[in-house]
Amino acid sequence: MSGYPDLERFAYGFGRAEVNLGPAGIVTAITAVNFDQPTTEEGVMGTRPYPILRTEGNMGMGEGSITFSDEAERVRFLTALGNNYRQKIWPLNWTLTASGAPTVEMACVGCRVLGNPIAHAQGEAALGGDVSFSFMYFTINGLVPHEGLPSPTR
């Protein structure tokens, strides 16, 4: 539905993302971030054929992907991580913005590159670059999804 005006003024847009690699610099040429980290819960069964309670649940490692503006920016990111780049740990932070609405700050903590798929072809379009990653946990405006996780922003 892109192209339709936001008449209600409530739609959030992708503001800015950055990966802080310390002395190697901050990478900002990111056009999209996707991730998921579901909680798996179990039912507590009694003598009835349905659950009587539910467990708190377990949250495993999260997985996601970053899309860089072009292949050169992806290579710059991997180069900044250095040799053995799939073993380096880094933070990912991004914001969502909307006119007249509070900014939403999101973060994936303890990220590590899992893959960097290559799909090169001839043509006019710039070669985009994706990097898949894992992470320990995420925050939304400093809030953590489960008790006991440290909040890096609060």
Image (cartoon, rainbow, N blue to C red):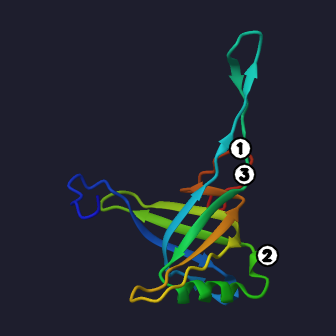
Q: Is residue 133 left or right of residue 9?
A: right
Q: Which residue is mark 3?
A: 149
Using the image as rendered, state which of residue 130 and residue 83 is in the foreground.
130
Mark 2: which amino acid? Answer: Gln
Q: Residues within 10 Å of mark 1 (few under 14, many from 20)?
A: few
Using the image as rendered, state which of residue 125 and residue 22 is in the foreground.
125
Using the image as rendered, state which of residue 100 and residue 118 is in the foreground.
118
- Residue 76: x and y in percent read 60, 89
Residue at (29, 62) in percent of width and height: 2
Disc 3 versus disc 2: nearer the observer = 2
Disc 1 versus disc 2: nearer the observer = 2
Decide which of tag 3 and tag 2 comes sooner along the chain. 2
Residue at (40, 58) in percent of width and height: 102
In three-dimensional space, the C-alpha distance between marks 1 and 2, rounded to whole angstroms, equals 27 Å
Q: Which mark is residue 87?
A: 2
Decide which of tag 1 and tag 2 comes sooner along the chain. 2
Mark 1 secondary-structure assignment: loop
Mark 3: which amino acid? Answer: Leu
Q: Which residue is mark 1?
A: 147
- Residue 5: x and y in percent read 21, 60
Mark 2 secondary-structure assignment: helix
Mark 1: which amino acid? Answer: Glu
Which quadrant of the figure contains the C terminus?
Answer: bottom right
Mark 3 secondary-structure assignment: loop
Furthest residue in direction top, as rendered: 47
In the rendered structure, are the residues bearing label 3 and label 1 in contact, judged by CB atoms less than 8 Å apart? yes
Residue 89's place in the image compared with 70, above or below, is above
